[in-house]
């Protein structure tokens, strides 16, 4: 069947964790159009009636090379069609600025459907604009699709929890990554017909780029190839821990941050701890005078022999890493300690032990079937959790639907819904 029409999809990205969640959806749209082109004229070969035009909007919430640009290259994401250049600010200022600038874009582009992913300020800001916009006197507005819907930490002190709840309640299509999300949305009275269990697009990216990440030379650049010297690892097997911390509740208050670092001392005495530090965290380390916990060294430039030295007892602070380097480091780590949401999921999929430095998680499946344990933020809790994860052989399972085909499933629903609602 000849494709006769084009549906315009607008996809929004803004901050680091959005890029890996959106990349597979953008790739799936490209594949959809290619299949349509190939099957044009062949009856029944591809049953969609329209091509998909994707307009990619980058809000600019994250703007550094290290926090944004590198991810476009690593994940093969095309250059954004629109860049809002918003940058940092308080939650209110950042959200408001995105809303103001995004409204103009939405009115100009008039997409049939808006895709927002995850739980960052950009996600909520753009969903909110689309929910209230009116393209004509009939009040026509784009369908709003939220990818990674339904996750709940039940901690409203987390800015992301507010973003998740509000985005879910204005969305028309809610794409859920794990079973808890289905329950949460049901409990909040979201109509069943809007909710689709599709799996996890972040895992689509992980599975698509895992092999390529093995080609990264980050283990050499950080001298981790044979770091068995006295740390008890098998010869030739890197044994190190990987750390990420950036949640405001963990790093924005001196005493809490200090407590976490003291809780990590035993671990950093037993193996190198590599810490690619988020800009927020780097600022706080300086502000709270916590530099004594760290050894700050630059990884050697690509291709150059490493001069990185590992001293016991200190955490090795490096700049934020690109996607492929980070994936490689995560895949070879003996342990990952984190307060990130996505890393809990990635380690579950990779079967790497993970200690989450938080009291709660909006991703309970990573604890239930996966390799993750919640340590809380006390010194003792962190120390014990790290010891337990290093000593025991953790075995996890990959949650349902985390199979690399989530974006494909999302696109099937989107195409069906666009046709059903006769948006075209
Ligand atoms: C944001 C998301 C969080 C996500 C995190 C991942 C919200 C509410 N939070 O938090 O869910 O886990 O991204 O990274 O949306 N900065 C830079 N360079 C950049 C970006 C930020 O230096 O490219 C600095 C800013 O100046 C600011 C700090 O980092 O001081 C925080 O940035 P912001 O976007 O406000 O929130 P994140 O902590 O990154």
Image (cartoon, rainbow, N blue to C red):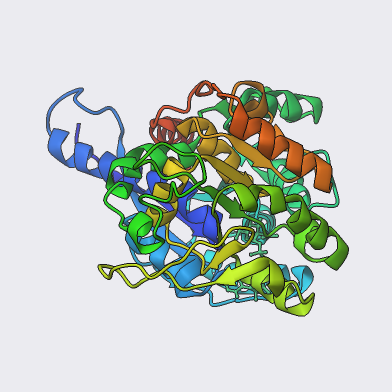
406 to 160, vertically: above or below: above
Across and down, in percent, residue 91 comes to 76, 68
The answer, for residue 261, to whether it is visible in the render is yes
The answer, for residue 422, to whether it is visible in the render is no
Q: Quadrant for ligand 1?
A: bottom right
266 left or right, relative to 307: right
Total number of numbered discs in the rendering: 0
Where residue 360 sits, quadrant-wise, is top right
Where residue 33 sits, quadrant-wise, is top left
Where residue 348 sits, quadrant-wise, is top right
Q: Residue at x 60, y 65 (%)?
A: 278
Across and down, in percent, residue 252 comes to 79, 66
Across and down, in percent, residue 351 comes to 49, 30
2 to 164, vertically: above or below: above
70 to 52, vertically: above or below: below
Which of the two residues, 109 or 240, is positioned nearer the viewer here?
A: 240
Quadrant housing the C terminus? top left
Across and down, in percent, residue 291 comes to 69, 74
Quadrant housing the N terminus? top left
Q: Which residue is drawn at 61% across and 29% down?
A: 391
49 left or right, relative to 322: left
Q: Residue at x 25, y 67 (%)?
A: 303
Which of the two residues, 239 or 149, is positioned nearer the viewer here?
A: 239
Which of the two residues, 290 or 360, is positioned nearer the viewer here?
A: 290
Q: Residue at x 15, y 33 (%)?
A: 39
């Amino acid at each position: 069947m000849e494709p006769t029409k084009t549906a315009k999809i607008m996809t929004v990205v803004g901050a680091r964790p959005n890029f890996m969640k959106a990349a597979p959806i953008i790739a799936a749209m490209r594949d959809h159009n290619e299949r349509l082109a190939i099957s044009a004229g062949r009856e029944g070969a591809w049953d969609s009636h329209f091509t998909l035009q994707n307009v990619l909007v980058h809000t600019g919430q994250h703007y550094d090379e290290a926090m944004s640009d590198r991810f476009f290259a690593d994940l093969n994401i095309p250059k954004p069609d629109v860049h809002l250049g918003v940058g940092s600010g308080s939650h209110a200022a950042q959200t408001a600025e995105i809303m103001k600038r995004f409204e103009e874009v939405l009115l100009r582009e008039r997409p049939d459907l808006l895709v927002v992913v995850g739980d960052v300020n950009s996600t909520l800001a753009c969903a909110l604009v689309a929910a209230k916009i009116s393209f004509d006197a009939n009040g026509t507005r784009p369908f709003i699709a939220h990818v990674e819907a339904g996750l709940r930490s039940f901690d409203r002190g987390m800015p992301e929890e507010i973003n998740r709840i509000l985005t879910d309640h204005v969305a028309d299509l809610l794409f859920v990554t794990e079973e808890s999300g289905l329950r949460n949305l049901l409990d909040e009275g979201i109509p069943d017909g809007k909710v689709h269990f599709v799996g996890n697009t972040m895992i689509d990216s992980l599975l698509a780029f895992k092999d390529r990440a093995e080609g990264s030379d980050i283990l050499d650049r950080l001298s981790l190839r044979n770091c068995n010297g006295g740390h008890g690892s098998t010869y030739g097997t890197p044994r190190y821990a990987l750390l990420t911390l950036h949640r405001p509740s963990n790093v924005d208050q001196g005493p809490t941050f200090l407590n976490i670092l003291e809780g990590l001392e035993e671990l950093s005495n037993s193996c190198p701890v590599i810490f690619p530090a988020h800009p927020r965290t780097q600022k706080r380390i300086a502000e709270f005078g916590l530099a004594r916990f760290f050894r700050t060294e630059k990884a050697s430039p690509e291709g150059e022999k490493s001069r990185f030295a590992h001293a016991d007892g200190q955490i090795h602070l490096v700049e934020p890493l690109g996607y492929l380097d980070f994936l490689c480091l995560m895949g070879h780590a003996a342990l990952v300690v984190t307060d990130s949401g996505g890393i809990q999921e990635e380690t579950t999929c990779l079967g790497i032990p993970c200690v989450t430095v938080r009291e709660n998680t909006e991703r309970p499946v990573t604890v239930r079937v996966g390799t993750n344990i919640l340590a809380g933020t006390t010194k003792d809790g962190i120390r014990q959790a790290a010891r337990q994860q290093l000593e025991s052989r953790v075995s996890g399972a990959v949650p349902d639907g985390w199979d690399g085909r989530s974006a494909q499933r999302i696109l099937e629903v989107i195409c069906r819904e666009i046709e059903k609602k006769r948006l075209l």
